[in-house]
Image (cartoon, rainbow, N blue to C red):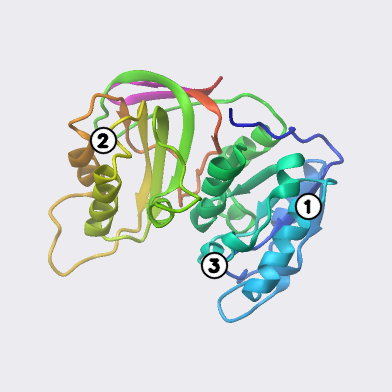
Amino acid sequence: MIKQPPYLKKGDKIALVCPAKKLPKPIDHAIEILKDWGLEVILGDTVNASHHQFAGTDALRTKDIQRFLDDPSIKAIISGRGGYGTIRIIDHLDFTEFKKNPKWFVGFSDITVLLSHLVAQCSTQCMHAQMPYTFDESTEEALISLKKALFGEKQSYSYQSSFKNRAGEATGILIGGNLTLLAMVQGSVSEMDFTDKILFLEDVGEHEYSIDRMLRMLKRAGKLAHLRGFIVGAFNEIAEEKISFGQTADEVIWDIVKEYDFPVCFNFPTGHISNNLNMVLGAEVNLKVETNNVQFKYL
């Protein structure tokens, strides 16, 4: 059973931290938005820290996150941004107190390492959603989806896919995140169980061959064979190559999963895009897929 942390209410304290890269710009606007939601925002030391490309040294980032994991008065921890660096500190964090008083952890991209670890080792739900660094470029819909999720309002999403889906319906526990980071945690204690899950994946700035390689690694490891459903998010800013790979990212993915019979939907609004809708890892969801229409709802 994957535990659901308590939902937020007005007046609750939340913490902002940077587990990976440093912030290249102020996030004052995002802080004001969070305050407008009725939340008391506590800034971690990493929000203004800098050590080369990181938001402080590994030791500082570890200490900063540990402080809020252990503090029962903090009801949610939101990552300021992703980048790179979470995998350098994940094994130095102690989740003993967090397990006693679980709270929402929010982030995406590099923060997938932490999200995967929370599901795998703490059996606790967490949120793949916009971060303060991306608030300025976010659609209102994506920000509202985060707010509603934090405050416990059940949501459903529907959209039309431009790439042909494989029709079907599935109900199950949602897992997923950034493909690169999920590939990087395979074989570690942070690896989630894929069996009977609905998986969503997204990535940014990768070559088609890299997407192909990582997905084939997951396939060879048996991670794709027993899924109940597969959600393909945004695979954008594909790096150009001198010689074409010959397939788009969506074509690469379809070629790898076409032999299975679970529903597959493409172009789902999640990932490094402005309309990055909130996805609750560990939550039970229902996925209805038609050739070009998709309906997704939390149960």
Determine the residue positioned at 55% across, 33% down.
Answer: 282
Residues rendered magenta in the picture: 286-295
Q: Seen in the image, is 179 located left or right of residue 59?
A: left
Q: Amino acid at mark 3?
A: Arg
Instruction: Kindly identify which residue carries mark 2.
Output: 163
Q: In the image, what residue type sits under mark 1?
A: Asp
Q: Is residue 292 magenta?
A: yes
Q: Where is residue 275 drawn, in percent x and y? A: 50, 43
**Which residue is nearer to you in this view: 251 or 122?**
122
Secondary structure at badge 2 equals loop
* Residue found at x 67% / y 73%: 59
Q: Is residue 249 magenta?
A: no
Q: Which mark is residue 30?
A: none
Task: Bin the neighbour count of mark 2 within 10 Å (Cα to Cα): few under 14, some 14-19, many 20 and up.
Answer: some
Mark 1 or mark 2, whichever is nearer to me = 1
> In the image, residue 27 lies at what x, y percent?
69, 62
Tell me the quarter of the picture where residue 42 sits: bottom right
Please say whether residue 209 is visible from this viewpoint.
yes
Q: Kindly identify which residue carries mark 1.
A: 70
Indicate the secondary structure of the residue bearing disc 3.
helix
Task: Say whether disc 3 or disc 2 marks the residue closer to the N-terminus.
Answer: 3
Q: Give how far apart the Cα atoms at labels 1 and 2 are.
A: 45 Å
Residue 9 x %, y %? 81, 34
